Image (cartoon, rainbow, N blue to C red):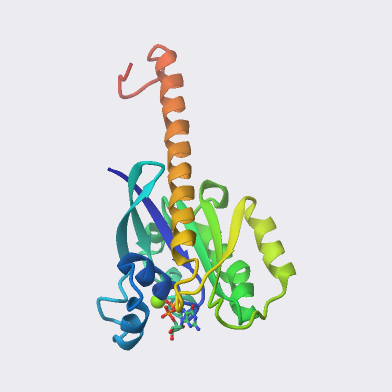
Amino acid sequence: MEEVKIILLGDSGVGKTSLITRFISDDDDSFARKNSAPRSSQFDPDVKAKEVEINGITIKAHFHDSPGKDTSYSSHSIAPNFYRNADAVILVYSVNDQHTLEALQDCFVTEYATYADISATSWIIVGNKNDLPLDIEKSVLDDLSRCLGKSVALFASAKTGKNVKEVLHIAVKKAHERRKQKEGTFNLKEERQSNRGGQGGCCGRR
Ligand code: GDP
Ligand code: MG
């Protein structure tokens, strides 16, 4: 089965775990259950997987949840692995908190760039808590999009469930496209290598 790795970044409290829990469990009770469960319970895991069908292909998406700025992975040895080979990154902020939007560029994208190439992944920017009044400056969102090159900006509410499925489907689709693109580039490199008639190769592959 085809698989993709998707990581979630954003301040603590913006709703990353709630979005994933809602998407994975696919029911209306998940939000209440997650929020009544202790934070370290089974409802607050680091990696969760779900099989998603995109254009007739079943893709197993692995969502790597992060604990947020306060407990940044940068101070731990797992940092490189967390960022490595992400096919898509979902940046989450709260639509009622401008600081969480600013933190995406100032903190999370900056940190990401120290471990991985910004242009080698797909970026999805999600304004969560869209059930609350909007209180962000659009120019900050525009600056962030510009800095990422190609990205999609969407809104969702893990509380009401509105747009959660749509947003995560788009993330899986973008991740899959990115994965295919990377594999294509890899195959092309291999082909070029073999067309050289084995010159300079160390593995003897033809
Ligand atoms: P995380 O730290 O980014 O994983 O955030 P959590 O998923 O733990 O959520 C933090 C808090 O925000 C919890 O108290 C949730 O109830 C609340 N929350 C999450 N999503 C929403 C949402 O869409 N709307 C509202 N109003 N609250 C939300
Ligand atoms: Mg969380």
Q: Nearer the viewer, residue 100 or 172?
A: 172
Q: Which quarter of the figure has residue 103?
A: bottom right
- Residue projecting furthest to the right: 139
Residue 190, x across and y down, in percent? 41, 25
* On screen, residue 58 above or below 7: above
| x and y percentages locating residue 149 in the rendered image | 65, 51
Q: Which residue is at 38% across, 53% downward? A: 5
Horizontal side of 152 relative to 81 (left or right) equals right
Left or right? Give the position of 70 relative to 22: right
The single residue placed furthest to the left in the displayed view is 42
The percent position of residue 204, horizontal first and vertical second, equals: 30, 19
203 versus 2 height, above or below:
above
Q: Residue at x 56, y 52 (%)?
A: 118
Give above or below for 176 relative to 41.
above
Nearer the observer, 37 or 194: 37
Looking at the figure, which quarter contains the C terminus?
top left
Considering only vertical position in the picture, is 165 above or below 149? Answer: below
Residue at image position (45%, 49%) is: 173
Q: How far across and down, in percent of the image, does residue 143 sit?
A: 71, 63
Please tell me in which quadrant of the rendered image residue 110 appears. Answer: bottom right
Q: Residue furthest top?
A: 197
